[in-house]
Amino acid sequence: MSGRLGVAIVGVGGAVATTAIAGVEMIKAGSNSLAGLPLADRTIKGMAGYRDMVFGGWDLADETLSRCALRHGVIGDKELADGASSLKDMKPWPAVGSTDFCANIDGGNKIAADSHRQAIDIIRGDLQRFRAEQQLDQVVMVNLASTERVPDLGAPSLANLDAFERGLDANDAAISPAMLYAYAAIGSDTPYANFSPSVAADAAPLAELARKLNVPVAGKDGKTGQTMMKTVIAPALRARALHVDGWFSTNILGNSDGKALDDPKSLQSKINTKKELLEHLLGYPVEDHIVMIHYYRPRGDDKEAWDNIDVTGFLGQKMQLKVNFLCKDSVLAAPLVIEIARVLGLAQRRGEGGVQEQLGIFFKAPQTRDGGEAEHALFEQQLILDEWLGRS
């Protein structure tokens, strides 16, 4: 028996989180199928079922999750009346926020903490209360918060765990909200996944802490639409010896993720994770690899991704490949969040801590145990996950 799995979400009022929660609540009510869930066809001993999942979490928005969901426009009154009505009774816990790290996102539902240590204590208290009130057998944490700017990775407090502890004591400004959540989770034996591009458990001190305490961690930046397609197409071009001369990618989206990325510093965090994988997939650098993301409010959660790929083939002949992916951002992301939480819970039950490389298929910039180059090709990643799931 796997028991009840609690999923504590950073950014629980966001479009991805409310979509995931509504979907699971509708599964429980029998009004939603298992379509779109990558592991729905697997029967895996020890992994929590969808109906055994319970959600809670933090957000800067001080309103019910049903109002948050209606504001995002991914689910509506129909879903809220058809199985997802529990969102009307769910409110976010006060969250850690920083306009220094995420300039375009703020709210009044903030943790009243005077120090990093106090914020961590409050987060851990929330986790303990969540486990007790919901009678949970396990709790995992998933970061779905808006993208933070890249921190100063050369800051002394980010060098190692001892330095990080001193930085916490000194309220070092180099330590971000994402890092505080990750530290709080790992230190309370709570598996942690970073679905955002923000630096968190991939920071050297936090990766060290996860290894030391044998707590499962995974991340970062969910691989949902355009980048998922890139990790399918690029290996195919390489297999056919079609040389990529240039790859132009652009996105338009109007949800809160897009609003956060309208800040140049947050945008750079996202572009970094989207660009890093192409050289690995192809085996050579693409000089003209351009990635652009534009906030366009009327589009809402209906993201549009364009790719133009210039290739050279036999006899030096030039060709082009064009991909136009019109997708619902949160509908692609929510099922991945659900499966990541289930796999993290299973890893903990198996006693497997530290970086969970088998979850790389769900991320643009997967963490590795040794900090080396990750596998990015989707089908190779699928084999790694399948092999891990198949272990008894």
Image (spheres, rainbow, N blue to C red):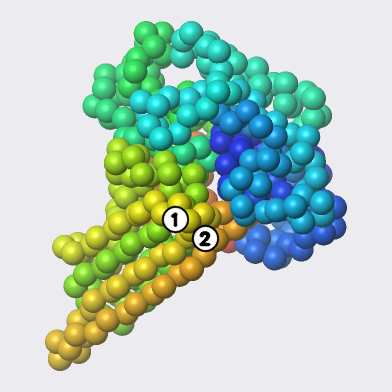
Residue 232 falls in which quadrant of the image? Answer: bottom left
Kindly identify which numbered label has been placed on residue 75: none
The answer to whether residue 188 is seen in the rendering is no
Kindly identify which numbered label has been placed on residue 302: 2
The answer to whether residue 70 is seen in the rendering is yes
| Left or right of 27 on screen, residue 157 | left
**Label 1 neighbourhood size at 10 Å, few (<14), some (14-19), many (20+)?**
many
| Left or right of 332 on screen, residue 269 | left
Q: Amino acid at mark 2?
A: Asp
Q: Position of residue 65 (x, y in %)?
A: 68, 38
The Cα atoms of the two marked residues, 1 and 2, are separated by 7 Å
Which residue carries the number 1 mark?
A: 253
| Residue at position x 46%, y 10% in the image | 115
| Residue at position x 14%, y 87% in the image | 316
**Label 2 neighbourhood size at 10 Å, few (<14), some (14-19), many (20+)?**
some
Q: Earlier in the sequence, mark 1 or mark 2?
A: 1
Q: Is residue 160 above or below residue 266?
A: above
- Looking at the rendered structure, the secondary structure element under dot 2 is strand
Q: Position of residue 180 (x, y in %)?
A: 47, 23
| Residue at position x 21%, y 70% in the image | 246
Q: Position of residue 183 (x, y in %)?
A: 49, 24
Q: Is residue 237 above or below residue 99?
A: below
- Looking at the rendered structure, the secondary structure element under dot 1 is strand
| Left or right of 78 on screen, residue 245 | left
Q: Amino acid at mark 1?
A: Leu
Q: Please state which of residues 101 and 234 is positioned toward the viewer in this rendering.
A: 101
Quarter holding the N terminus is top right
Pointer 1 with pointer 2, Cβ within 8 A: yes
Q: Residue furthest front?
A: 298
| Residue at position x 36%, y 44% in the image | 262
Q: Residue furthest right?
A: 29
Q: Please state which of residues 177 and 253 is positioned toward the viewer in this rendering.
A: 253
